[in-house]
Each structure stands twice: as C-alpha cells, then as structure tokens.
C-alpha cells in the first residue's frame, strides 16, 4: 500500500498549498468553485449564467419518504464539508430542496441549481442518483474533509435517467480474497457511478468463501488452499509460493455487506458455481463428485475435471446451501454459474450414464441442462430466479433462466430470441482482468487486450435483435476475475478507469459517435482523476501516453502518432535524429543505407507527450521492420475474434511485432477455431524468397499453433507455386519460416492458408472445445 500512502502525502501538500494561496487571512477555510463534469454523462445538462453560492449553514427541506436519502446527504455534507443542516417546512426558505415528482421514471431525477438547489425524483433510487450527481459537482478537494466557507455552483439544469435497468460490476473473491472493508469501498465506487448490481463470485475451484452453517467443512477445509501459483499459468515450469492461503465471509459479514449495499441502492447477486468450478467443495465433501475420491483445493488456475455429480445426495446438498444463501441475499437472482463444466467425469460415471437413460437424455450437454433445470425449479419455489453463464444454453435452457453472455453475443442473441432476459458481459468489452495497455511492464494479467476506448464503445444490444427482442437485454456489467490480482491496489488499477467507461455505457447508453463522444468522456475523465486521487483509488492513467500506427494511402506508408486527450504537444524522433514537433502523419519507406541492405530496413520511432511544456506520461518507442509486405494490401477470409482484434487485419503486415511474453496486444490477432486464408496483394510485382510468421502456443489457455500452413504464390505468368510448412514445436512463441529456395520469385499476390489446430484433446485444458489460433506479423523477404 506504499503507493497509496505516497499519493496521500503528495495531495495533502498540494491542498495545503491551495489553502495558503486561497485564503491568506484564514488558512483553515476557503471557497470552492464547482464544475459541471459528471460521469456517467447525464441525459441532458444545460448550464446558465452566474453562480449559486451555498454556505456552511444550510436550510434544508425534504419529505419523510426520502428519509434514508436525507440522512445520507446531510451526513455526507457535514462530514466532508462541515456544513450544518437546519430543516425548514417552507420551500421559499430552503437552500436545498428535495421534492417528489410522480412524472419521473423510477430511477430518474431532475437537478436544478438556480436560486437554490432542487432535486426532484419519484423514488428513493432516483433521489439517490441525483445526490450522486450533486456530489460530483462539488470540487474534488472537499473529499479531504477540510473546513469550507462556501461552494459556488454554476447554474445548471440536469435531467437524467438510465438507459439500462441492469448496471453492474462483478468481483471474483475465490481466486483471491478481499476483506469486508474493501468490499464496502468497492460498493461505494459503484454507487458513485450509479451502478445498481454487485455480482459477487463467492465459490470456485480455488476457494469457497461463504459460511454455510449446515456444511461447516466448506469453510473449515474448502476456504483454504495449500499454495498458490506464482507468475503466469503459461510459465514453464510452473512455480508455487508454498504458502497456505484462504479466507471466507461469515454470514454476519454477508448481512453487513448486503445492508451496506442496500443503503446505496445496490443489489448484491451471489454466485455459487455449479456443476463445474467446484473442486474446492468436492475437497470438503468428496461424495459430491463422481469418483468419491479426495481431491485438493486447486492451487492453480484453469478448468478442472472435478464437477458435481448429478445424484440426489448432490442435489440435497445444493438445495440446502442455496436455501441459506437465499435467506442472506434479498436479490431476486441467484447466479449459479454453469460455465466451463467438463463432461469427462460424467462420461465415465455409471450413475450419470444410467440417469441419462432413465431421463431420455441424448448426451452430457442435456444432462447439464437437467442439472440446471433441477436447481432452477428449487430456487423458483423459494421466489428466486437464476442467472447463468451462456453455457447453460447447451442442451436446452431452463425455463425461467436469465443468461449472462460472456463468450460473445451469440448466447445473448439465442436467449433473447427465445424470450429470455440477458445481461451482456462479453470478453471483448467487459473483462477487466485483460490488459489495458501494451507496455511490457503492465501488471501480469490473464491475457487479452481491452483498452479504455473499446469499453466506452461497447453497445450491449446486439444488432441481430429486433426491437421486441432487444427489450430482453437488461444491461451489462464489467467483470474482474482475480487469478492474477492479489491486492486491492492491483484490483483498482485493473478496474479504473474502465469501470467509468462501462458506467457510462449502461447509464447514458451506447455512443452514436465514438470519436466525438469519447473525446467528451476524456474531457470529463481527466479532472475526474483528481477526484480518484483524493479517494485513494489506484487507477491506471494512460491518458497522456502515445499511440503509434502505420497507415497506408495511395501505396505509400505513413506513421501517425496520437494521444487520447486534447491540448497536448507531441515531440518525436526517427532513428535518434533531431526531435520534431508532431503535426501530421509522416512518410516512411524502405531505407537504402548500407546498414539497411544487410537485412530488413528498420525505423525506430521515439516520442513523448508534453502538457504546458512539461513531459507527461511515459516515453514511447516503436520499431518498424519495413519488410516487402508493409506497403501491400491484406485481406482475411474471417474476422478476428472481437476480443482479440485490436490491430485489425493491418496488424498482419504493419512491420510491428507482437509481444514476446503475452498475446494481449494490438499485434496478435486471435481466431477461435477458424481456418484462415490470408491474401497479401503487392502494389507491383515483387521478388520474394522467404516468408515467416509467429504463432502463440499457450495450451493452458486453449491457444495452439497449427500443425502446418501453406503459401500459395501466383507468378507473373499465371502459374501457381504452392509450398507447405510443417510445425513441430512446443515453444510458447513458435517462429515458423518458409524459405522458398535460392531463387527469388516475382509475384503480385501471396496467399497463406493456415488450418486451425482443431478440437482440444482430452486431458488438456479446454478439452472438447475449439482451439484458438493466434498469429503475429507475416514477414515477407
């Protein structure tokens, strides 16, 4: 936590300096001037001329219906600003007035600041969200709880309501445990951003985190693992820390957290995984598995073959567990997982096979549907509904289930068309455990690449749904899985500011003009970061970093530099030559120096962002290997998977290599089970004699290099040359080179055919699923 401590000291010094400048005669109090920056963006915000000044003695009027919100607001203002509240029963005497307006929707509010501050709402929820907007209008310094004489508010009218009913954030506490006080902080952050659902992932292979009184071994045994994987799952050999690790929430802890969230109009949705991701529970009660054998609580990440066996003993256990869970959580929903449940044990289990015959089930997928339906019937009988990951669609969807679509949008489309409600949380836009920047020193993450702008650009409603079907899309949420997140600092770094972008998507609605709206979002985010500083949130700040890209126009190659926020200066150099001010994309071409002739010509571009003359952000460097395909055109027969498509098809021939340590960047393109055909068309006939590319080979994450690939070259005379290159390597980065022969071939078109590895074999992570293909730069010499 040293980083947070340093930030606190620095901010205190800044604020003390502000005090001395603002009020020399009285260094204990000063005036604030509010702004109009609000995240998520209101539906309508209109500013007027002048200011309304609120001093420390507040005359306040509200109604009894808003009782808890009245207390929340007055306590907040007294604690943070030292303002005193005096109630009045006259509207004309009130400086702050809360009114009920039956014409507003359930979560809507109307905030006006003119001669007084007025918030109108139809419900407690609506008023609470109006209060959150008013709090955001306060300058961030008030969070230091310093004495304040007054606050000057700009005159403004805010009319607001949410786009989506479900606005959520998820947190996995099974892989790594987080204490009650941090969970409360996390809930406070959700409330600040008008999110209304906290999806609490409480059980998994690596730990059971909730007390169940009828089954004490779940916390005596299943809440602790003997050690934990160090580094990444793909590291070879895998290493472990040798330290016992665990923790759980008592039922009193749960009640405390649920009550705390309820006061902030946040519903806590618990997740109890089944039938897969259950190795910890089976460790505590081996009879719940198909083999009856003792298994350890998992010490590394991934998908495990130990799953609940669908027998009466198991269903009795689960019904009893869920009864205790249901009593603790007022939520209408209980999340029952349903994802990544291997069928290996069921296939070899005599009971499971006999059950399938008795029930007339065709396969193990239908057996899983039977499992989920049995659980759903029980929960429905207690007045609860189930949510499951989109795998619960396999074998037939339980009648009243809500689907949480994570493997893309297909699950959501299928469920919505069948009349089921869906919540969107696809890996492509919602997995905040993915990398958010491409720098090699980013904290270790599971993989993937999800920058802030991509989150902001998310549209939760699939285009394939008609207006009636689209009504079943309740909303969306961001997910934080914690395999590689062990501390609260690191969790905040992964969550912020992407959580702000997701909050804007689900409250304000998807953008209709990404470039324009994203610029507006960043204009509000930049000052909001000062608020997060004072709140001691360890956010990731990539707003002042440089991004570079190779672009092509009229068969010429240019390089462009950009930084997310406006009003900044960019300076750069090429191959360590004179620094220049960046004005527009600059041309690059094949170098002709003697050094370049020895190999592929290379550009090294360095850059830095400047704000008011001072360097900000981190230094930038990019290397372009100008091989013969850089100025060519490229086409692919299939689009990369949305979660792994950041660089687009141009990433294949832009001269930039992907990371050597992870596939989560702009240069690696990912394809799930697709056979690829990459067509490279040169602007003019070109002599080539060597083709090479790289494949990412991380079997633990379902990534497999192909067994072979083929190059098909169309010669000038129309004849075809076809070469096949075999691959036999278990390295994580597989470099595959094809030397045509000593002769150079003159061609205008090159086609690469790359078959998928196929289906992952039994005994490996993801067995039975399609393998992923990840491909880097296609280098032509």
Image: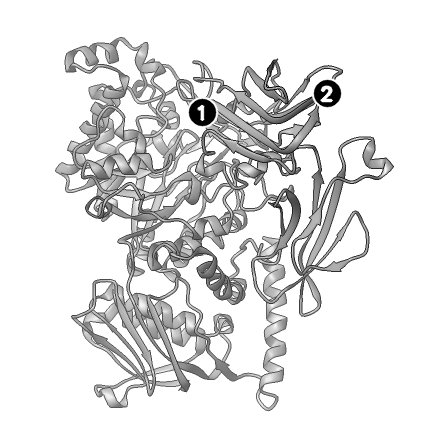
The residue that appears at 21% across and 44% down in the rendered structure is 469
Residue 775 visible (yes or no): no
Q: State whether residue 384 is above or below residue 566.
A: above
Give the image location of residue 155, x and y in percent: 38, 82
Residue 456 visible (yes or no): yes
Give the image location of residue 403, x and y in percent: 27, 38
Q: Residues within 10 Å of mark 2 (few under 14, many from 20)?
A: some
Mark 1 vs mark 2, CA separation in Å? 31 Å
Q: Earlier in the sequence, mark 1 or mark 2?
A: 1
- Horizontal side of 473 relative to 679 (left or right) equals left
Q: State whether residue 423 is above or below residue 629.
A: below
Residue with the mark numbered 1: 674
Q: Residue furthest front?
A: 717
Residue with the mark numbered 2: 744
The residue that appears at 24% across and 19% down in the rendered structure is 367
Residue toward you, 705 or 319: 705
Q: State whether residue 732 is above or below residue 662.
A: above
Quadrant containing the C terminus is: top right
- Horizontal side of 601 relative to 203 (left or right) equals right
Q: Quadrant of residue 319?
A: top left
- Horizontal side of 247 relative to 27 (left or right) equals left
């Amino acid at each position: 936590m040293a980083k947070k401590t340093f930030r606190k000291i620095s901010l205190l010094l800044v604020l003390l300096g502000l005090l001395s400048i603002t009020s020399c005669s009285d260094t204990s109090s000063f005036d604030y001037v509010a702004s109009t920056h609000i995240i998520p963006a209101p539906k309508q915000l209109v500013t007027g001329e002048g200011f309304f000044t609120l001093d420390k003695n507040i005359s306040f009027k509200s109604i009894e219906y808003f009782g808890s919100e009245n207390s929340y607001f007055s306590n907040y203002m007294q604690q943070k600003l030292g303002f005193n509240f005096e109630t009045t029963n006259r509207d004309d005497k009130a400086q702050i007035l809360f009114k009920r307006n039956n014409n507003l929707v359930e979560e809507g509010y109307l905030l006006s600041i003119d001669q007084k501050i007025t918030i109108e709402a139809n419900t407690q929820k609506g008023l609470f969200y109006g209060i959150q907007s008013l709090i955001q209008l306060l300058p961030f310094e008030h969070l230091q709880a310093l004495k304040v004489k007054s606050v000057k508010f700009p005159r403004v009218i805010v009319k607001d309501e949410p786009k989506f009913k479900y606005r959520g954030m998820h947190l996995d506490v099974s892989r790594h445990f987080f204490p009650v006080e941090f969970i409360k902080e996390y809930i406070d952050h959700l409330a600040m951003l008008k999110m209304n659902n906290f999806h609490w992932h409480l059980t998994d292979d690596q730990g059971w985190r909730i007390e169940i009184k009828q089954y004490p071994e779940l916390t005596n045994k299943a809440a602790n693992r003997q050690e934990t994987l160090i580094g990444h799952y793909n590291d070879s050999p895998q290493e472990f820390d040798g330290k016992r690790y665990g923790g759980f929430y008592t039922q009193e802890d749960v009640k405390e957290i649920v009550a705390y969230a309820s006061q902030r109009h946040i519903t806590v949705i618990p997740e109890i995984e089944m039938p897969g991701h259950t190795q910890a529970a089976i460790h505590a009660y081996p009879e719940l598995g198909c083999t009856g054998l003792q298994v350890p609580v998992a010490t590394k990440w991934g998908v495990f073959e130990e799953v609940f066996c669908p027998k009466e003993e198991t269903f009795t256990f689960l019904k009893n567990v869920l009864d205790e869970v249901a009593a603790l959580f007022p939520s209408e929903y209980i999340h029952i997982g349903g994802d990544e449940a291997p069928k290996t044990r069921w296939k070899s289990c005599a009971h499971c096979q006999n059950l399938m015959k008795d029930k007339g089930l065709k396969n193990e997928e239908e057996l899983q549907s039977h499992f989920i339906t049995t659980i759903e019937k029980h929960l429905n009988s207690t007045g609860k509904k189930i949510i499951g990951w989109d795998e619960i669609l396999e074998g037939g969807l339980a009648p009243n289930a809500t689907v949480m679509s994570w493997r893309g949008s297909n699950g959501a489309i299928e469920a919505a068309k069948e009349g089921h409600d869906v919540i969107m949380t696809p890996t492509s836009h919602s997995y905040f455990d993915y990398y958010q920047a491409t720098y090699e020193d980013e904290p270790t993450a599971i993989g993937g690449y999800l920058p802030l702008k991509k989150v902001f650009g998310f549209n939760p409603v699939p285009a394939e749904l008609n207006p009636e079907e689209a009504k079943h899309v309740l909303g969306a949420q961001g997910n934080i899985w914690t395999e590689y997140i062990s501390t609260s600092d690191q969790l905040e770094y992964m969550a912020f500011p992407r959580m702000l972008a997701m909050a804007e998507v689900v409250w304000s609605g998807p953008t209709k003009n990404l470039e324009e709206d994203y610029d507006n979002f960043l204009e509000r985010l930049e000052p909001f970061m000062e608020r997060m500083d004072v709140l001691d949130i360890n956010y990731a700040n990539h707003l002042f970093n440089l991004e570079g890209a190779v672009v092509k126009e009229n068969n010429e190659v240019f390089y462009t530099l950009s930084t997310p926020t406006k009003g900044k200066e960019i300076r750069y150099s090429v191959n360590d030559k004179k620094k220049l001010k960046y004005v527009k994309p600059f041309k690059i071409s094949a170098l002709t120096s003697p050094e370049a002739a020895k190999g592929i010509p290379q550009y090294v571009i360095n850059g830095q962002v400047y704000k008011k003359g001072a360097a900000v952000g981190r230094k930038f460097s990019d290397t372009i290997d100008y091989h013969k395909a850089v100025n060519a055109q490229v086409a692919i027969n299939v689009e990369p998977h949305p979660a792994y498509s950041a660089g687009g098809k141009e990433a294949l021939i832009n001269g930039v290599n992907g990371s050597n340590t992870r596939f989560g960047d702009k240069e690696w393109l990912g394809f799930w089970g697709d056979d690829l055909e990459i067509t490279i068309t040169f602007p003019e006939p070109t002599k080539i004699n060597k083709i090479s590319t790289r494949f990412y080979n991380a079997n633990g994450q379902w990534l497999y290099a192909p067994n072979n690939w083929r190059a098909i070259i169309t010669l000038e005379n129309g004849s075809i040359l076809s070469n096949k290159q075999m691959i036999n390597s278990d390295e994580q980065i597989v470099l595959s080179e094809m030397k045509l022969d000593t002769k150079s071939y003159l061609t205008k078109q090159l086609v690469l055919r790359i078959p998928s590895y196929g289906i992952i074999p039994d005994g490996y992570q993801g067995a039975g699923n399609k393998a992923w293909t990840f491909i880097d730069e296609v280098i032509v010499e």
